[in-house]
Image: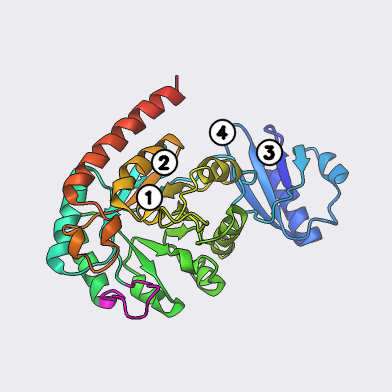
Amino acid sequence: MIIVLNPHATKEQVALFKNTLEEKYGVTVNTWVGVESTVLGLIGDTTQIGEDWVSAQEVVESVKRVQEPYKKVNRKFHPDNTVIELPTGQKIGDGSLCIMAGPCSVESEEQINYVAQRVKDAGAAFLRGGAFKPRTSPYSFQGLKAEGLDLLKGARKVTGLPIVTEIMRVNHIDMFESVDIIQVGARNMQNFELLKELGKTDKPILLKRGLANTIEEWLMSAEYIMAGGNDKVILCERGIRTYETATRNTLDLSAIPIVKKRSHLPVIVDPSHATGKSSLVEQMSLAAVAAGADGLMIEVHNDPKHALSDGAQSLTPDKFDEVARKVFALKKAYDEIMNS
């Protein structure tokens, strides 16, 4: 249930009304204070709360029931966009375009430091890199694990770029204490025990859409994290599995405006995993910006032909320079059009 409060209601009246709802009906009341209005979001069993009774309260302007199963993620509960700001100053969801770039897998100190410096010089705000790698084949390179995390931290020290890397298991959370953004990969989107534990952390969580999951299922996974108390969630569209074989996955760009209408969380796009082909990354990056994405996650490798994982979808640093110039130029033009 969503309750919009009368803008003239006093703090005392609002506090008394909230206490009545919580104590009499046993619901949790989330408060969102906007520029023009204050909204109360009721979470729990609201079937016993009559709309007529709520409407009759002096502090209430309007009331409506919410049909969607996700509440904290829902834009109706939080009309303004969520902006996630890191201690180092980078923001996601504030209207700018953030780029997370780096290799699929961390392979060596020389490799990650070189790529980190190159993507930073091109305008990337975050360094992405895999230390733990989920692979379809048990015989494929699985990442450097703890050593890879140390190398990412070293690259952060050299470049100042916050790091984004994927977590695989609940008992790895302590290892990720110094990671800036924890990524939940597509295969773990519905690992609910992991999501619940990440909900207890204070780290931004980048949640990738599952290989064959609907938008509602994706948002419900985000709800698991937020229900635990962590509202720093970033959604990442990385393509879904369809019958098409021309690309690794099918990039669902329509998900961007759909999610933005339903949720207040920022949405970024990973064109590298979506297409699986480096030749398509530029076009899909531009298309994602035109569709309203808050950011991009792009794989960059200093020597894609000899990469230990996903070299076919990785850009060279020189090509990334070119793509970054174009997407930032398009973002500027996009903002001018949308604001005209």
The region drawn magenta spans 132-146
Q: Quadrant of the C terminus?
A: top left
- Whether tag 4 and tag 1 are in contact, CB under 8 A, the answer is no
Q: Which of the two marks, 2 or 4, is nearer to us in this view? A: 2
* Residue at image coords 43%, 80%: 171
Q: How far across and down, in percent of the image, does residue 90 sit?
A: 32, 47
| Res. 271 mark | 1
Residue 304 in the figure: left or right of residue 196: left
Crowd class of label 4 (few under 14; some 14 to 19; many from 20; radius 10 Å): few
The residue under the point 47% across, 47% down is: 266
Q: First in sequence: mark 2 or mark 3?
A: 3
Residue 294 magenta-highlighted = no
Q: Helix, strand or loop at disc 2?
A: helix
Where disc 3 sits, the SS reads loop
Disc 4 vs disc 1: which is toward the camera? 1
Which of the two labelled residues, at mark 2 and mark 4, occupies the earlier sequence position? 4
Q: Is residue 135 magenta?
A: yes
Ranked by sequence position, the earlier of labels 4 and 3 is 3
The residue singled out by tag 2 in the image is 288
At label 2, counting other C-alpha atoms closer than 10 Å, the crowd grade (few under 14, some 14-19, many 20 or more) is: many
Q: CA distance from mark 2 to mark 3?
A: 44 Å
Q: Nearer the viewer, mark 4 or mark 3?
A: 4
- Which amino acid type corresponds to the residue marked 3 in the rendered image? Thr
Q: Position of residue 124 (x, y in %)?
A: 26, 47
Depth check: give the residue in front, 242 or 95.
242
Q: Of callouts 4 and 1, which one flags the residue occurring earlier in the amino acid sequence?
A: 4
User: What whole-number distance in Å separates the C-alpha atoms at marks 4 and 1?
Assistant: 36 Å
The answer to whether mark 3 and mark 1 are in CB contact below 8 A is: no
The residue type indicated by label 1 comes to: Pro
- Mainly helix, strand or loop, the magenta region? loop
Give the residue displayed 44% in from the left and 54% down from the top: 238
Q: Judge depth for marks 2 and 3 and give the one in front.
A: 2
